[in-house]
Amino acid sequence: IGGLATLAICTNPLTTALGGSTLALYTLVYTPMKRTSPLNTWVGAVVGAVPPVMGFTAATGCLFAPEAAIMASSLFLWQFPHFFSLAWMVRKDYAAGGYHMLPVMDVTGKATAATVHRYSLYMAALPLLSSALGVTSSMFAVESVAFNGYLLYLTQRFKRDTNQDNARAVFR
């Protein structure tokens, strides 16, 4: 209540609505889904992608802008390589806790690693899209090649062998 009141006083109704919606999505949908569906991670990724958009809406009052979409997409897509590689390493703990997540239900790790790689591919396209939309300069796309290339290399290695070391390398 205090956080939403602060948003209402210090920002605007749009940012406050996003904050309230994110809070509801986290507590009423994402948290209960952890024990019922592997789709919980996708809902959690939405929750994680909203805060920078809230910063954008607080500053501009606008939700539908390329800048907001790029920021949200970056965080949404990043969460899959990051979280699924971590969850693969500690899947026994998640299973013991009764969590239904892709890495827990994926005995071989192949589906987990394929998902990690696929979302890394999507993420690698964002700097190109960002430059094409005029959100960043073309140098952002050029400079991202090394980072995204290395991430894709690591995710491909994880796809070939779903061992702990490869998962840890992606996570880091």
Image (cartoon, rainbow, N blue to C red):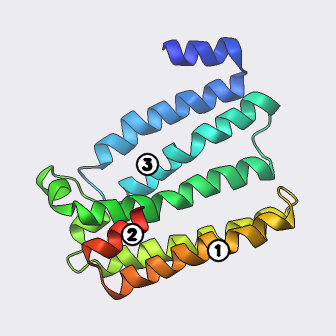
Residue 40 shows in the view: yes
Residue 43 rendering spot, x and y as whole percentages: 45, 51
Residue 34 rendering spot, x and y as whole percentages: 29, 49
Q: Nearer the viewer, residue 38 or 121?
A: 121
**Point 45% across, 32% down: residue:** 24
Please tell me whether residue 83 is drawn above or below residue 10 in the rendered image. below
Residue holding disc 3: 44
Measure the C-alpha gap from mark 1 to mark 2.
Answer: 16 Å
Residue 97 rendering spot, x and y as whole percentages: 15, 49
Amino acid found under the numbered disc labelled 2: Ala
Label 2 CA crowd tier, 10 Å (few <14, some 14–19, many 20+): some
Query: Tag 3 or tag 1, which sits nearer the N-term?
Result: 3
Amino acid found under the numbered disc labelled 3: Gly
* Element class at badge 1: helix
| Number of marks in the rendered image | 3
Residue holding disc 2: 169
Q: Which mark is residue 93?
A: none
In the picture, measured across the screen, residue 52 lies left or right of residue 28, that is right
Mark 3 vs mark 2: give the one in front.
2
**Point 34% across, 66% down: residue:** 168
Residue holding disc 1: 146
Measure the C-alpha gap from mark 1 to mark 3.
Answer: 28 Å
**Point 70% across, 22% down: residue:** 13
